[in-house]
Image: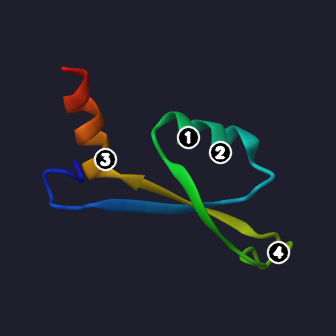
C-alpha cells in the first residue's frame, strides 16, 4: 500500500512496556529509531519510535530473487 502511494517511511510510537506490540511490529519489519521521553500523559512513560522503510523492504525482496 505505501509503496504504490509513493510513501517511503511509516512511523509509529509504542510503549516500551508493550512487549507484545513491539514484537509484532518488529516481525512486520519495523525497527526502533528513537525515543520520545514522557510521551504518554497518563504515566509519563517514554515512547519507542519505530519506522518501516518501504524502499528497503522492496530492495530486500528483490535481493531474494
Give the secondary structure at mark 3.
helix
Residue 15 location, quadrant: bottom right
Q: Choose the circle earlier in sequence order: 3 or 2.
A: 2
Residue 8 location, quadrant: bottom left
Image point 77% across, 70% down: which residue?
A: 46
Q: Choose the circle earlier in sequence order: 3 or 4.
A: 4
Give the secondary structure at mark 4.
loop
Lateral position of residue 51 relative to residue 46, left or right = left
Return the mark for residue 56.
Answer: 3
Q: Are marks 2 and 1 in contact (CB under 8 Å)?
A: yes
Relative to 11, say whether 26 is above or below.
Answer: above
Spatial CA span between label 2 and label 1: 6 Å
In this view, the mark in front (3 or 1):
3
Spatial CA span between label 3 and label 2: 20 Å
In this view, the mark in front (4 or 2):
2
Tell me the crowding category of disc 4: few under 14, some 14 to 19, or many 20 or more residues within 10 angstroms, Cα based: few
Question: Residue 6 in the image: x percent, y percent?
Answer: 15, 61
In this view, the mark in front (4 or 1):
1
Q: Nearer the viewer, residue 1 or 64?
A: 64
Q: Choose the circle earlier in sequence order: 4 or 2.
A: 2
Image point 65% across, 43% down: which residue?
A: 21
Q: Which residue is mark 2?
A: 22
Lateral position of residue 20 relative to residue 50, left or right = right
Question: Residue 7 in the image: x percent, y percent?
Answer: 23, 61
Give the secondary structure at mark 1.
helix
Give the secondary structure at mark 2.
helix
Return the mark for residue 26.
Answer: 1
Relative to 63, say whether 58 is above or below.
Answer: below
Spatial CA span between label 4 and label 1: 25 Å
Q: Choose the circle earlier in sequence order: 4 or 1.
A: 1
Amino acid at each position: 500500500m505505501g509503496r504504490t502511494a509513493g510513501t517511503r517511511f511509516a512511523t509509529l510510537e509504542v510503549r516500551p512496556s508493550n512487549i507484545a506490540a513491539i514484537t509484532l511490529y518488529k516481525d512486520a519489519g519495523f525497527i526502533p529509531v528513537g525515543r520520545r521521553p514522557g510521551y504518554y500523559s497518563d504515566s509519563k512513560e517514554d515512547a519507542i519510535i519505530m519506522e518501516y522503510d518501504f524502499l528497503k523492504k522492496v530492495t530486500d525482496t528483490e535481493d531474494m530473487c
